Amino acid sequence: MAAWVVILAVLILSAFLFYYRKADLRSSSGINTLEIVDLGGDKQWVSIRGNDPAKPVLLFLHGGPGSANLAKLRLQVPVLEDHFIVVNWDQRGAGKSYHPWIDPRTLTLERFINDGHLLTGVLKERFHVDKIYLMGFSWGTIPGLSLAARYPEDYHGYIGVGQIADLSRGEERSLDWVMRAAEEDGNEIALSELTSIDPGYYGVNWQDQLARERKWLLHYGGVYHTARSYDHEMKMLFSASEYSWINRAFWPMGSTQSLKHLWPQIMSFRFPGTVDRVEIPIMFISGRYDWNAPAELAEEYFQLLDAPAGKTFIWSEQAAHDVFYDEPDCLVQAVAAFSKGHR
């Protein structure tokens, strides 16, 4: 019995050390680290990669809430590492930054904005720079553009991919589009599941309703233009060397908890009337077929937004919501050109 206790203890310790490992694969010509940062007393994980340590820093805010993936940019748009030191961040309570004892009361939009501000400070000090670039994707565009508006002195520029403008209106447009797609397809099963959905997502079963809407949105090409499942996302997560098996086991818990606590907060969030002016250069990149965060609303908001330092709107013509997957070359070219023009 004693031997089994010792073996079990060793296994638990090994798993713990692997879960909290820090990898530093720095070479003479680049940087590749996976490490913990302290953000206001809370430990969170970042991946820092780049082929030239002299390049500007780009901080990426993932989607969700809770859809962390430290390997996303590395695997889908690796060329960005030729242009930037790319920082992927698993946000509070998600991915590698999830732990079972996290206080759900800390899962607030304001806390995420503060985390982003603290992380920006850490990166500025680490790389001895006055400013960095900021990129948000989907949910990440909410804290992302909020940071850009609130702390313009920290950033060369802001890039919003799948930019959210008004989440409530966006969900109404998204449901309307997918229902029309189902009607045109004569899909009675889809219509029966979609008809009972309240796009305000206020009821007790709002998570089930949201999952049904996204299932059919995925089916009709409003999430990806070139895929009809999340299989590639799962393969990417399960093959990512950044994650241990413990991280992967906990990943759904972090995602579910993040969505549960943050979605009701952000359903009433809208940028028009909240952020009407941004002092730094901005760029929105939207997929022509994006009905997850309807691109027409991003374009509408873009036209209203006052950006005296310059603003650019890029249509990714062969993409839906996830431009990184559907049309990576378009994204890399746009972001590289944006950074060269705004330093």
Image (tube, grey):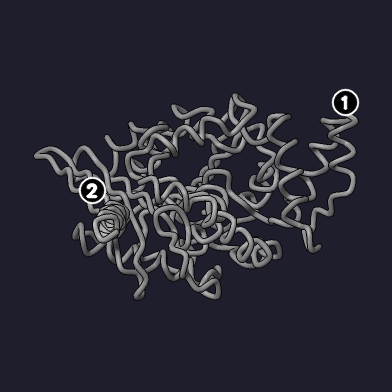
Instruction: Identify residue for label 1.
Output: 184
Res. 33 mark: 2
Q: Residues within 10 Å of mark 1 (few under 14, many from 20)?
A: few
For the N terminus, give its image quadrant: bottom left
Earlier sequence position, callout 2 versus callout 1: 2
Tag 2: amino acid: Thr
Q: Is residue 237 visible?
A: yes
Considering every residue shown, the one lying at the far left of the view is: 28
Considering every residue shown, the one lying at the far front of the view is: 1
Residue sitting at 82 percent across and 30 percent down?
181
Q: Is residue 213 left or right of residue 145?
A: right
Q: Is residue 249 above or below residue 260?
A: above
Residue sitting at 40 percent across and 59 percent down?
97
Residue sitting at 60 percent across and 26 percent down?
227
Tag 1: amino acid: Glu
Q: Is residue 240 left or right of residue 235?
A: left
Residue 287: x, y in percent?
60, 34
Res. 196 mark: none
Asked whether disc 2 touches disc 1, contact meaning CB atoms under 8 Å apart, the reply is: no
Q: Nearer the viewer, residue 330 or 152?
A: 330
Q: Is residue 166 left or right of residue 89?
A: right
Q: Secondary structure at mark 2?
A: strand
Q: Is residue 243 above or below residue 198?
A: above
In three-dimensional space, the C-alpha distance between marks 2 and 1, rounded to whole angstroms, equals: 49 Å
Q: Is residue 167 above or below residue 220?
A: below
Q: Nearer the viewer, residue 261 or 6?
A: 6
Residue 67: x, y in percent?
52, 49
